Image (spheres, grey):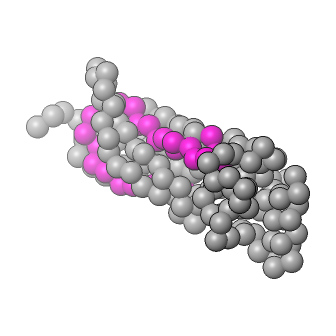
Amino acid sequence: MMRRLAAGLAAAAVGATMVATAASPAFADDPGRLDPDVAGGETSLSLDVNPEPAWRGRPITVAGKLSVRCEEDYISGFVSVIHADRCKKQETWHRLAYKRIVILFQPNGSGRWEHVDTIRTSGKGYFGIKVRARSSGTWRAIFEGSRHLAPSEGTDYLKVLGRHH
C-alpha cells in the first residue's frame, strides 16, 4: 500500500500521468514475485471488422481497442499507472498504449486459426490493420496479458461475398 501511495504522490508532484522508473517499485525487494499490494488489472479488448459484408479481394479493416478497468492500479514493465493519475471521474475503463495484439482468422468450415499479424496498440490504446477479404469466417484479436494485466480477446464474424476465381 505504501508503494502505491508513494508512486501516486510522485506522479502528482511531477504532474505526470505515467511514472517511468528505472526499476519498478513493486519489484524492488524481489524481482521474481508479484507485489501483494498491487492488484492485476482487468482488461477488455474490443474488435470490429469492416465493411460488413465485404467483397472478396477488397480491403477490410480489422480494428479495436484495449482497455483496463480504472478501479485498479497496475504496473506493467517499467511503467506504473495509478488510478488517480489516469482515469477521469466518470471513466470506468482506460485505454492501454503500446501493448502487443495477435490477430487470427478462422475460415468457415475450418477448425484451425491462421496467424494474420502481430501488432501493437497506439499511444491511445487503438489498433488496426488492413487486409484483403478472402473468405467468410471469424476474426480474433488476443491480448496475452502481462505480469499485472489479465489477458483478454475479442472476436467478430465477417461474411465475404463473391466467388473464388
**Rendered residue at 64%/71% (across/down):** 22
Question: Quick check: 88 above or below 36?
Answer: below
Inspect this view and state whether residue 159 appears: no
Which of the image's four quarters has the C terminus? top left
Please report the residue visible at 88 percent of the width from the left and 57 percent of the height from the top: 2
- Residue 50: horizontal and vertical position, in percent? 43, 46
Q: Residue at x 42, y 45 (%)?
A: 102
| Image spot of residue 147 (x, y percent) | 61, 47
Whether 114 is drawn above or below 73: the answer is above
Q: Is residue 129 left or right of residue 17?
A: left
Q: Which residues are magenta?
A: 126-150
Residue 144 located within the stretch drawn in magenta: yes
Asked if residue 19 lies left or right of residue 32, the reply is right
Q: Is residue 34 magenta?
A: no
Q: Is residue 163 visible?
A: yes
Q: Is residue 147 left or right of residue 137?
A: right
Nearer to the camera, 95 or 40: 40
| Residue sitting farthest toward the front | 29
Residue at the location (86% across, 77% down)?
A: 13
On screen, 135 above or below 91? above
**Residue 52 location, x and y as percent?**
42, 40
